[in-house]
Image: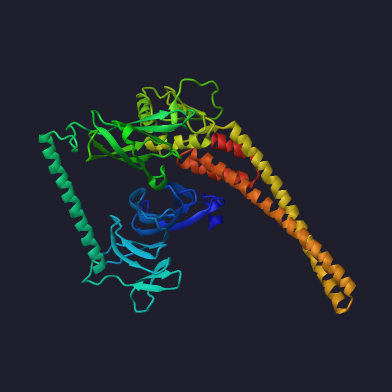
Amino acid sequence: NNICLYFSGFGKYKKITTMSWCLIYKKYFQLLVGSEDFDIRVFKEDQIVSELNENETVTSLCHMHGSRFGYALANGTVGVYDRTARYWRIKSKNHAMSIHAFDLNADGVVELITGWSNGKIDARSDRTGEVIFKDNFSSSVAGVVEGDYRLDGQVQLICTSIEGEVRGYLPASKALKGNLMDSNAEQDRIRELSQRRQNLLLELRNYEENAKGVSQTNSGMGVIPANTQLQTTLSVRAATEAQKAHVELSISTPNETIIRAVLIFAEGIFEGESHVVHPSVQNLSGCVRVPIIPPKDIPVDLHIKAFVGGRTSTQFHVFEITRQLPRFSMYEVTEDSPAAPAGTVSFSINERPQRVVMWLNQNFLLPEVVESPNVTFHSLRGGGLMSFHMASNGQITLTTDDIDLAGDLVQSLASFLAMEDLSVEADFPSYFEELRTTLTEVDEFHSVHQKLTADMADHSNYIRNMLVQAEDARLMADMKTMKKRYRELFDLNRDLINEYTIRSNNHNALLARLKSVNQAIQRAGRLRVGKPKNQVIAACRDAIKSNNINALFRIMRAGTASS
């Protein structure tokens, strides 16, 4: 499978973790591929048509129905996508060992069946993620499949544990259609509703006490002014001696109220996907500042909950708000550009400058609204510069030494402007020089690999002959010669082991260089969109096969091998 995907666009040297099929686009099924780099890629024939970013290694994929498919991550997350939009997701402290699509409640729509590392089996609605059935094994689930196990014409859901226990589940009967939860589950549901009732009664009592507090001016109650609201701002903060460069989230109220605590839920930013700020009593105020350091350039929704009340309040109001962190939030606008980057990307678009300005305002944290599409940024991660310039004829020029950032910018802008195809001219002198060095090392490692293989073959023949001589000496009772030959065999075996270590290190180094070459081809492709992207990737591979290095660099720069 890896070799097939190498020739069809994915890359032999990117570890694939899972695959499935799904009807994402039109009437033909596409290949879904999950990899260790946290991405789900959608292939149409031999081309990548979509990439879905997750925050952990994708461990399982399964087609459900139509354009929907289920997925599982290494951190215990499972969920459902509809085409390229995530429908729902849940996260558990346990790991999902296997997922499968099966219509267990006989309602005509398959559910997502998940087998967990703690032995639990659950079936969730493809629409909401609500659990409609669950069961438990005494050990971790090994796998979930379906089939006519009893050969009676009925398909069962079959689950197996790592200790060998096998259970089969038939779809629900007409009497139980849509209601698979057993009495224990129903009792759990009753207890849950009873707890919610108690919480609502407690909340009602708090409101009644607050109402009394208004008339009695009791500041200990959680009474706050009617105009109280939660205000949030995002700003870029450069590195200092005490703190790394970060994005600062400021949460404040417009009056004398204080913020007692803040809870932030954000995928892929905080450990455990949540962060709590609880100021000490001495530091209570109406403003809380939270430093955020996004690990990658992806947009993230920040779900914020804040406890707001008076300075002496014992009861607090909970305010909820959602704020999106822009994709390129770790870049600060700068006026100083002492050394312009050497890497450039240029292309033409048929769009008004105002549209590009709108994209800049949506994807960067700007100190004020930008009115011109000519701006320079300073990276808070690597410290490099990135300049964006648009001429009156629609010619756009990006200057940056980071080819990955250039690819992300091109893909983001093309997506915002709904551009299906985009040809680009690009030049990254330092990166291309590193790639040329890598290609030279690939040739050297190939030569060493061939020489080591030939030496090992010679030694193998020598060992075979020596072993025959030693056995002949033993049969002829020539113990002296036999011992001599076996001592020589021992020494030769030690040399072979040492040579194997050298050969293994050479092989690993060769694979690392080949992976770098493949990544360079993918990066050159990400600088383009649509057909030009596919053409560049295919042409680069042809140049590698024919060992035409000069053509490879011409393709990466201009998108074609012609000079």
Please say which color scheme the image uses: rainbow
Q: Farthest left residue?
A: 215
Number of marks present in the image shown: 0
Q: Is residue 64 left or right of residue 41?
A: left
Residue at 81% across / 62% down in the picture?
Answer: 491
Residue at 49% across / 41% down in the picture?
Answer: 533
Q: Which percent across, then down, holds residue 222?
A: 19, 38
Vertical relation: 330 (above or below) 15: above
Return the residue nearer the eye: 263 or 47: 263
Among the 4 quarters of the image, the one containing residue 195: bottom left
Q: Residue 178, can we see it?
A: no
Q: Is residue 484 left or right of residue 316?
A: right
Residue at 18% across / 53% down in the picture?
Answer: 198
Return the residue nearer the eye: 469 or 208: 208
Q: Which percent across, then down, holds residue 102?
A: 34, 65
Q: Which percent across, then down, holds residue 277?
A: 35, 39
Vertical relation: 372 (above or below) 484: above
Q: Residue 76, can we see it?
A: yes
Q: Which percent across, then down, holds residue 43?
A: 45, 51
Return the residue nearer the eye: 470 or 432: 470
Return the residue nearer the eye: 325 or 95: 95
Which quadrant, please, contains the C terminus?
top right
Residue at 46% across / 31% down in the picture?
Answer: 245
